[in-house]
């Protein structure tokens, strides 16, 4: 096992230091019920930059047959990790039609209806996301757990209201710029963090995962829009794209850290 020491810079002269572990097996530990907590009350050590600024260029929304994916500009980046991680894209994972279990991460063994991933790569060390995704800590992905609530979530409509235009694999549409911060939960200082893998093949062990403990809500109708996405191409027999999440994997001695008690 490769031992890695992480030093996470916090604000001011405070530092959050811990030992992480990368495991060569293609697995992501996704149940936080036995997380190792560490406390940093009231301290935001994770800062998304540019997230609150709607960009100037439209964003491309694409049904790639595995997920629906929105391109993001590198003007969005993360601070609080040892290097600068710039945004590339966001995408979603969900369950089968009608199911409210479709997240990849679980908290206390409880799955959520869906999960948003915002993918970033270490632009200080690598020239492209393709290069970074093969390297330890090359990527930083934010995970946002999505549950079903009473109300429609207007922020998610930027994406979900457009899905009927890209029902088929290979289809793309253009989304006007919006503030990506609206997709995040209000409380960003409470999260879990661990070194893990891509959740899709080739499942490289290259991801610094940050999963917010607070969830966001969308309506049942909004979840349905997601679950109506197809994995078949236009003029092919319709096949629903569902259950595009990876099930929880063994911990394999990883340390999962919490930014709160
Ligand atoms: O599933 C995605 C995959 O589509 C790709 O975006 C990759 C990063 O290049 O990340 C995985 S995931 O681990 O963010 N689900
Ligand atoms: Zn993902």
Image: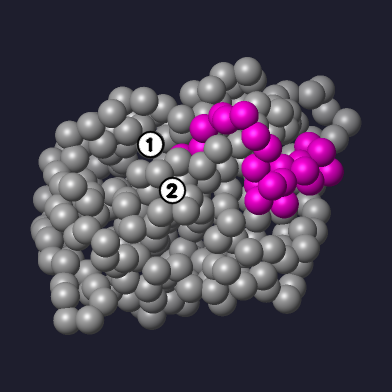
Question: Residue 124, percent across and down?
Answer: 38, 80
* Label 2 environment density (alpha carbons within 10 Å; few <14, some 14–19, many ≥20): many
Q: Quadrant of residue 131?
A: bottom left
Q: Residue furthest right?
A: 235
Question: Residue 140, percent across and down?
Answer: 39, 60
User: In the rendered image, is residue 203 in sight?
Assistant: no
| Cα–Cα span, label 2 and label 1 | 8 Å
Q: Residue furthest top?
A: 98
* Image position of 176 with respect to 144: above or below: below
Mark 2, ligand 2, within 8 Å: the answer is yes
Name the foreground residue: 131 vs 167. 167
Give the residue displayed 85% in from the left and 35% down from the top: 234
- Residue assigned mark 1: 105
- Secondary structure under tag 2 reads strand
- Secondary structure under tag 1 reads loop
Q: Is residue 160 magenta?
A: yes
Give the residue displayed 69% in from the left and 34% down from the top: 222
Name the foreground residue: 132 vs 41. 41
Q: Which residues are magenta?
A: 145-167
* Label 1 environment density (alpha carbons within 10 Å; few <14, some 14–19, many ≥20): many
Give the residue displayed 32% in from the left and 52% down from the top: 190
* Image position of 220 with respect to 27: above or below: above
Q: Are marks 2 and 1 in contact (CB under 8 Å)?
A: yes
Determine which of the numbered discs, if any, sits on residue 143 in the image: 2
Question: Residue 143, percent across and down?
Answer: 43, 48
Query: How many numbered discs sit on the rendered protein?
Result: 2
Sooner in the amino-acid sequence: mark 2 or mark 1: 1
Question: Residue 239, percent across and down?
Answer: 73, 24
* Image position of 151 with respect to 254: above or below: above
Determine which of the numbered discs, if any, sits on residue 146 in the image: none
User: In the rendered image, is residue 47 in sight?
Assistant: yes
Indicate left or right for 208 with 146 as reference: left
């Amino acid at each position: 096992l490769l031992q890695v020491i992480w030093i996470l810079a916090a604000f001011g002269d405070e530092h959050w230091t811990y030992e992480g572990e990368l495991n060569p097996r293609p697995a992501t530990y996704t149940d936080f019920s036995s997380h190792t907590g560490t406390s940093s009350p009231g301290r935001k050590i994770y800062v998304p930059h540019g997230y609150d600024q709607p960009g100037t260029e439209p964003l491309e929304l694409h049904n790639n047959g595995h997920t629906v994916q929105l391109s993001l500009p590198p003007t969005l980046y993360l601070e609080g990790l040892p290097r600068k991680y710039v945004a590339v894209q966001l995408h979603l994972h969900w369950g089968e039609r009608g199911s409210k279990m479709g997240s990849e991460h679980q908290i206390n063994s409880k799955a959520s209806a869906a999960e948003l991933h915002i993918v970033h790569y270490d632009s200080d060390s690598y020239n492209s996301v393709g290069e970074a995704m093969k390297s330890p800590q090359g990527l930083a992905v934010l995970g946002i757990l999505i549950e079903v609530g009473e109300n429609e979530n207007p922020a998610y409509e930027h994406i979900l209201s457009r899905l009927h235009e890209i029902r088929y694999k290979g289809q793309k549409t253009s989304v006007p710029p919006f503030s990506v911060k609206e997709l995040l939960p209000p409380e960003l200082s409470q999260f879990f963090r661990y070194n893990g893998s891509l959740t899709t093949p080739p499942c490289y062990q290259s991801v610094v995962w940050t999963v917010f403990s607070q969830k966001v809500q969308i309506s049942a109708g909004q979840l349905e829009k997601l679950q109506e996405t197809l994995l078949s191409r236009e003029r092919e027999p319709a096949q629903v794209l569902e259950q595009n999440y990876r099930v929880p994997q063994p911990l394999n001695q990883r340390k999962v850290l919490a930014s709160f008690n």
